Image (tube, rainbow, N blue to C red):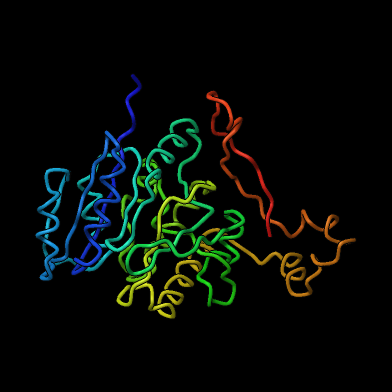
Amino acid sequence: MVKLPKLSIVTPSFNQYQFLEATIQSVLSQDYPNLEYIIIDGGSTDGSLEIIRKYEDHLHFWCSEPDQGQYDAINKGFAHSTGEIMAWLNSDDMYYPWAFNTVVSIMSELPQVEWLTTLNRGTLDWHGFPIKFYPIAGYSREAFLDGYYLPVGSKTGIAAIQQESTFWRRSLWQKIGSCIRTEFRLAGDFDLWARFYQYADLYGTHSPLAGFRYQANQKSRQLDKYIIEAEKSLAQMRDSSHWSLNLMRSMVRKLNLYRIPKLRKWIEPMYTYTSQIIIRSNPESPTSFWMIEESRFF
């Protein structure tokens, strides 16, 4: 029997007892046999500790103590991890039941995939019921540098990379220094993607992997502050990458030239991005397998 790779999941939490148990159950109910689950609590006083203790026999490590914020807690959790594949899930979000099997299957069959996320970003309401899926055309380092994955509401952002659906190999984590930079109090995830992109392409799967829960007290509602931090991180990446604006792509967008049928095919290579999408080949057969398909998007 082939040994499955170890999967390390970290959940940072602070006073989230309304949602924490559903988050924990979404991890443990995957029934993944080689799971290393870690919870880092920031010293909650709302009943969260009773929930964590209820599941502590299933945890690799947990603690409850003051920290320097969400990303400090995540770094602390990953410092206790040893898994080959890594991710974190915030204490109000949830994985879909097939998430771990999908990710592990893809990354086991395709060793060139160093980090992976969904092309169909899921959302949940306060109670955890699915609301809507938001599709994204693809992922590209060029598109990232152009500001495509800044949050909607920024000058250039069209679609964000969904943090709760993103998984990566420990080897990539080690390349970027094995930590999230805590100078970004809100946009530490965006900065992590920028640093990952320095070493590897992001691959997309059509499978939804996790749901982002809408609730009144989430930090992501501080959108203006998040955008400021993300733009600062992006500026640093652009500087280190010697990035310059693609004038043709900018002109096509500004003048909507891609809407002209006679021009579209001729200028497509000049303004589109190239994405690596993972698809299931021969899906009707027991011999189906994962393969990578190159796709262009704008």
* Left or right: residue 181 compared with residue 123: left
Q: Along the line of sight, which residue is nearer the eye, 92 or 298?
A: 92
* Residue under the point 14% across and 63% down: 48
* Left or right: residue 145 compared with residue 297: left
In this rendering, the answer to whether 204 lies above or below 236 is: above
Residue 78 place in picture, x, y as percent: 25, 50
Q: Along the line of sight, which residue is nearer the eye, 90 or 111?
A: 90
Note whether residue 203 is visible.
no
Note whether residue 282 is visible.
yes
Residue 287 place in picture, x, y as percent: 54, 23
Residue at the bottom extreme? 224
Q: Along the line of sight, which residue is nearer the eye, 243 or 76?
A: 76
* Residue under the point 84% across and 55% down: 265
In this rendering, the answer to whether 8 lies above or below 197 is: above
Residue 289 place in picture, x, y as percent: 54, 29
The image quadrant where one finds the C terminus is: bottom right
Residue 142 place in picture, x, y as percent: 61, 57
* Residue under the point 53% across and 24% down: 286
Residue at the top extreme? 1
